[in-house]
Image (tube, helix red, strand yellow):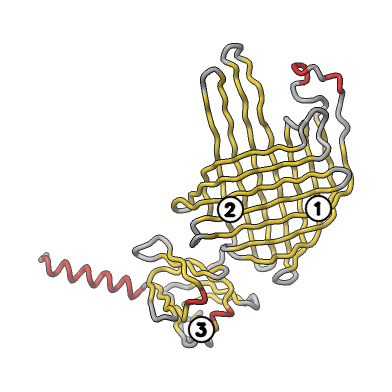
């Protein structure tokens, strides 16, 4: 094949690709071609031939069209699936039958495009050292979010382990061993207000807590909800039961086994929770903070604060500070545990 024919074929191929691509037209007249991924909150994500993702402010868009069906959710929770078509005056159409376009839909009425109903992440971190003292520590966590139109289910948990080995005596001392599991079901009665039912289970050998379990119901308010910004507040009554180990950790070495079994605790408590996350710097960093409190005769608070940095194709780096506070710890224990975590994981 001659060189001129090869160039013509390449040009035709590129033109065909462009013709079949989705197109977003901005209010300033610019056009961006590619594949529309999703719209959530105040931004639209589109994948182009020259960039993995391009993030566009939704209020900067005049109209758009697509060559593949997309699912569009409106403010009144109406769901439309079909090909997007261009319209005038900041609107779009949806062709779901292949024959007729819908009436123009103002872009201000669109809340989501290709909404994610299933998402989550899994992360792992750890460290090893050797020398006069051998150390190892590991951390793993995972969470799953399943969301429908009026319902939301959140499940998650984490595990931490660490120990030190004296190479001279070959004695291994446990430095950390704890885990947490949680679940939350929410039903939205309005776009902002929802009722919830939740469960929490924690264990911490260093705190002598064999199992702390909490169950409750309550009300929540979703101030913001999108892939860019989420903020909610929850409150309600709980039943909390805290079972301690029969004897303090490593009591024979610390000569405090004579303390005897630690008295378990249970009763009604008040619960509150705050959940916040937000992308900043053109979605290059995600800030997050969550904390949950249970107050009765004692006070238990667990909080997670940090940031995530997307690396590549769903892989992410996370840096966070975890703080667990218990106002009435087991005898000889501190009431505050703090952990600094650096993890690599995958989000979807």
Q: State the CA–CA distance, disc 3 to disc 2.
A: 32 Å
Residue found 63% across the figure and 44% down from its top:
321
Dot 3 falls on a residue whose secondary structure is strand
Image location (x, y in percent) of residue 315: 48, 49
The residue wearing badge 2 is 120
Image quadrant in which you'd find residue 31 = bottom left
Q: State the CA–CA distance, disc 1 to disc 2.
A: 25 Å
Q: Which mark is residue 91?
A: 3
The residue wearing badge 1 is 271
**Residue in front for this viewpoint, 168 or 204:** 168
Q: Which mark is residue 239?
A: none
> In screen coordinates, is 3 left or right of 98?
left
Disc 3 + disc 1, Cβ < 8 Å: no
Dot 1 falls on a residue whose secondary structure is strand
Dot 2 falls on a residue whose secondary structure is strand
> Where's the N terminus, which quadrant?
bottom left
Image location (x, y in percent) of residue 279: 55, 59
Q: Earlier in the sequence, mark 1 or mark 2?
A: 2
In the image, is residue 126 above or below residue 246?
A: below
In the image, is residue 134 above or below residue 95?
A: above
Q: State the CA–CA distance, disc 3 to disc 1.
A: 44 Å
Q: Earlier in the sequence, mark 3 or mark 2?
A: 3
């Amino acid at each position: 094949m001659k060189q001129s024919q090869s160039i013509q074929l390449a040009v035709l191929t590129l033109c065909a690709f462009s013709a079949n691509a989705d197109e977003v037209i901005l209010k300033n007249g610019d056009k961006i071609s590619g594949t529309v991924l999703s719209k959530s909150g105040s931004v639209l994500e589109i994948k182009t031939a020259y960039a993995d993702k391009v993030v566009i402010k939704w209020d900067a868009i005049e109209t758009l069209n697509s060559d593949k069906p997309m699912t569009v959710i409106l403010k009144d929770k109406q769901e439309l699936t079909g090909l997007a078509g261009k319209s005038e005056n900041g609107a779009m159409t949806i062709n779901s039958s292949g024959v007729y376009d819908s009436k123009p839909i103002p872009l201000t009425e669109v809340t989501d495009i290709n909404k994610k109903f299933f998402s989550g992440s899994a992360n792992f971190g750890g460290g090893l050292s050797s020398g006069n003292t051998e150390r190892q520590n590991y951390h793993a966590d995972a969470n799953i979010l399943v969301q429908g139109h009026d319902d939301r289910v959140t499940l998650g948990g984490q595990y931490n382990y660490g120990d030190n080995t004296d190479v001279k005596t070959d004695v291994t001392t446990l430095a950390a061993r704890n885990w947490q599991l949680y679940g939350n079901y929410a039903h939205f009665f309005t776009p902002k207000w929802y009722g919830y039912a939740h469960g929490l289970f924690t264990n911490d050998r260093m705190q002598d807590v064999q199992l702390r379990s909490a169950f409750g119901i309550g009300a929540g308010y979703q101030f913001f909800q999108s892939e860019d910004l989420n903020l909610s507040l929850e409150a309600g009554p709980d039943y909390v039961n805290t079972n301690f180990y029969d004897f303090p950790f490593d009591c024979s070495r610390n000569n405090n086994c004579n303390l005897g079994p630690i008295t378990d605790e249970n009763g009604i408590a008040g619960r509150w929770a705050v959940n916040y996350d937000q992308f900043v710097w053109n979605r290059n960093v995600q800030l997050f903070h969550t904390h949950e409190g249970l107050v009765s005769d004692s006070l238990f608070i667990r909080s997670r604060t940090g940031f995530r940095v997307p690396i590549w194709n769903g892989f992410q780096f996370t840096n966070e500070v975890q703080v667990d506070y218990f106002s009435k710890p087991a005898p000889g224990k501190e009431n505050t545990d703090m952990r600094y975590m650096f993890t690599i994981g995958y989000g979807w």
